[in-house]
Amino acid sequence: MPTRDGLTKEQRVELDLHTATDKMFDKYPTQVADYEPLKDKVALHKLHIKHINDRLPEKMQNTVIITETKNENRVALENKYRPICAITSTFAKKSENTSLAAAMKLGSRKLLTVADLNFLVTVENINTAITPVIADAEYVKYGITALMLTDGLKDATTFSGSLGSNRQAKESVSVASLAIEQMFVPLRGDKTDITSLMQYFNPKGGIKPDETFYNSIIAALTVNELAQNHTTIDGHIYEAGADKKVIKRAQVKNLTTGKLAISDLLGYYSISKFKGGVFEFEISAEGYKTIIVVVTIATGKHVTMDFTLEKK
């Protein structure tokens, strides 16, 4: 089975449900083949699922490389400074240097807990606390040298500088994540179209009634619908002005969850399947000024909200 590790929890559920619907169609090859519009849509649905699965390894590979490299560099620094802090702490206690002892205790804790961006500051503080005693005859006996501190600070500075490159690499992963979310847009459209086409087989008034086939597929689609649509926001995107001209292919993105919608020919968008809360939505379109709005949506509620964009 293809990996789902590159997806959010909600995306994994959604893709698995689409895949289950797709497999349900495989059980009825004759019915699918006999109705060409449905055959074409099912084939497209399979292709959309494949596109998502094909993109995941790229996203995951980038994520793993970034995380492993950063973690290895940080662990190496932690392993270098923990003994320095522990040994210096012993010296501080023996010499009754309470401020140095407190600094080493704080430094030891921060080495393990501080955010990456603040790691260099932690190393600098440790070095600053040790520097006044580095030449002390008694401290020299403990084996901590000025060169150790200099090398440690150099490594920490290099680590801090590498975070900028890591951020750029993470932006590439973010782009991959956005591309994957965009791939879900046509997949959701497939579901809507398939639901409509299945009326051809509706046992109650369909052109070619097939109760077993119809009920099986509709049941799969219903499970998909129930799993996906909890909280929903929808509406239209308009151009600023008295005419209220709709904007097609505008992008509405939930910056909190990453969920994305593209407005259709009528300017309509819809985002569903997310827990309630306070969200930032980014609305953008080519040739228009991007806006960000904050919206509060209770879990399970359906909120309709139109947005207006000004031309650049």
Image: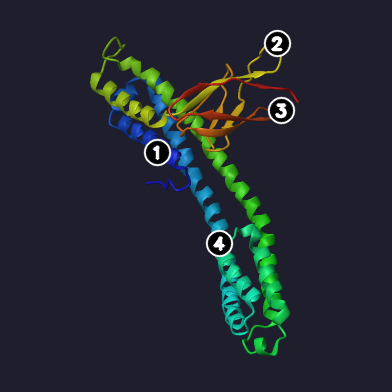
Q: How far apart are marks 4 and 3 (CA)?
A: 40 Å
Q: Mark 2 points at which residue?
A: 242
What residue type is disc 1 on?
Val
Judging by the rendered image, the residue that carries numbered circle 3 is 289
Name the front one of labels 4 and 3. Answer: 4
The mark found on residue 89 in the picture is none
Secondary structure category for the residue under label 3: loop
Q: Mark 4 points at which residue?
A: 113
User: From mark 1 to mark 3, how far is it between C-alphas?
Assistant: 34 Å
Q: Please report whichever mark, 1 or 3, sits nearer to the chain's N-terminal start.
A: 1
Label 1: few (<14), some or many (≥20) within 10 Å? Answer: some
- At x 44% / y 36%, what residue is drawn? 49
Which residue is identified by label 1? 13
- Classify 201 as above or below 87: above
| Residue 212 placement: quadrant | top left
Q: Which of 53 and 162 is in front in this view?
A: 162
Task: Specify how the rendered protein is coloured.
Answer: rainbow
Residue 162, position as x, y percentages in the image? 67, 60
Judge left or right: residue 153 versus residue 57: right
